[in-house]
Each structure stands twice: as structure tokens, then as C-alpha cells.
Amino acid sequence: MRLHRFYTNTPIGSKSFDLTDRDLIHQWKSVFRYNVGSQVILFDGSGTDYLCMITSLRNLGATLEVFKEKKTDSAPRKNVWLCMALVKKDNFELIAQKVTELGVNGIIPILCEHSEKRKLNMERLNKILVEASEQSGRGDVPVLHEVMKIEEVFQKGILPQEKIVLHPEGDSFHKYISGLSSVHSFAVFVGPEGGFSPKEIALFKSYNVPAISLGSQILRAETAAIAISSLLIL
């Protein structure tokens, strides 16, 4: 029987440990019908999967015993940060799920002049990232930053040195990437359905961020985000 894999933000540092994550305990008791003796796989973002047995299951907590450890072999090949313009709720959640499965290290929602949405449900998004990490077998959960304006992202200095912005009139992606075989960290900006405004394009130019195109086809924002993440990581 296939064991289910779950994320916990409780560091697993000993052979026997307690969990007090109410959502996880509720899921185990009400959805999976786990009992004492049930086995689960846990990961805490450290790059290791822990095969555990539940030795005590209570309404507000559980005690588990680790009896096998295995380093995860699904670490992303590249360090990629997606700076994604706010789009419709369902589309943004789809993007978050798929780029997590692909292996992005972080997601920064950006507020643009043409953004259709102005806010995000960060709690729901974090749950989507956790579930996608559990399902895909990766050993960590991407960092999800708060919503920022483009200027704020640059001012905080949190991005890798190599940055690109997707734009239909930019240089060919394949031409761009061919000269960067030794670069393993990227940040990519993807705009909303209406694209980046002239003012925002000028801002990217002021920071010397090259404009890159994925081809002559006009892509939806979610297609572009998933495609560029895949190309950079894989």
C-alpha cells in the first residue's frame, strides 16, 4: 500500500517527536482514518523524508516514531524565483501549484498597473504550495512572499543576480540562455494578461533586466509562467 506524504513545519530532530499541527491531525483522523500503528512519510523542508509510525493519536496532537530516513532526490537543478503579476484567483493558484511541482524556490506576487486582482488569499496559497510539494516529492516548500510592487522587489535585494522579464518583443529565450550555461540562479518576471505597462518596461530597463520572448505565439499569463519555469529549471 502506498504511504501518503505530508509536510510539517515542526523540525524532525529525534527518533520520537510530537506534532501539534491541528490541520494535519484533523486530516489524519477524519480523512485518512489513521490510528496508532499507521505509517506516514513526513518531511520538514530539510531535504529528508522520514518514514514514521504513529504511536499516539490525540484530538490535539500526535506522537510519532521515526524508523527510516531517506534523502530526497528531487532537489531542483536551478534556483528559480518567479515574480508573478497578480492575475485571476484560479489562474494564480494554478500557476503556484504547477511551478511548485516543477521546483521553483520562491514565488513573489507582484502588483502591476494592469493586474486584475489587488489581493491574494495567502493562507490558501500556502496550503496549495504544501500540497503540491507533498504530491511532487520535493523536499521543501517554496517561499511565498507578500504582494509587492515591482520597485519594492528590486529595493529589497532578495532576487538572484540574473533577472529576466518576459515580453513578446524581447530576444529569443534560446539565444539568451545559450550564453549562460554556468548560471544556476534566475529570477523571472511574468506580467498580467494586459502585459506590463510602458512605465513598468522602463523600470526594468533602468535595472538592466533583459526582455526575453518565448516565441511569436501570444501566451496566457499562466501558460507563460509555467513554460518559462520549466525551461529554466529543467
Image: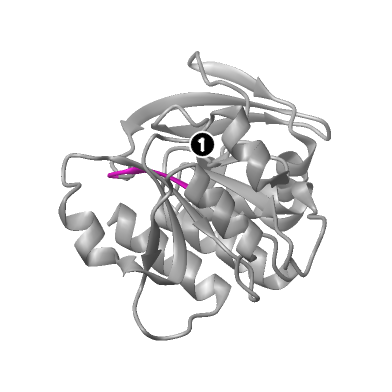
Question: Against 162, is 189 above or below?
Answer: below
- Residue 87 covered by magenta stretch: no
Please give the name of the residue rendered at 53% of the width and 41% of the height, measured from the top-left corner. 141
Using residue 176 as the reference point, say whether residue 17 is left or right of it: right
Figure label count: 1
Instruction: Tell me if I can see residue 1 in this picture.
Output: no
Q: Quadrant of residue 210?
A: bottom left
Q: Nearer the viewer, residue 115 or 139?
A: 115
Q: Secondary structure at mark 1?
A: strand
Query: In the rendering, at what x and y percent does residue 37 appear?
Result: 57, 37
* Residue bounds of the magenta highlight: 77-81
In the rendered image, the residue lying farthest to the bottom is 217
Quarter of the image where the C terminus is located: bottom left
Q: Quadrant of residue 46?
A: top left
Q: Name the residue tied to disc 1.
A: 42
Kind of residue sitting beneath label 1: Leu
Quarter of the image where the N terminus is located: bottom left
Q: Nearer the viewer, residue 32 or 219?
A: 219
Q: Residues within 10 Å of mark 1 (few under 14, many from 20)?
A: many
Instruction: Report the predominant secondary structure element of the magenta stretch.
Output: strand
Query: In the rendering, at what x and y percent does residue 231 appear?
Result: 31, 62
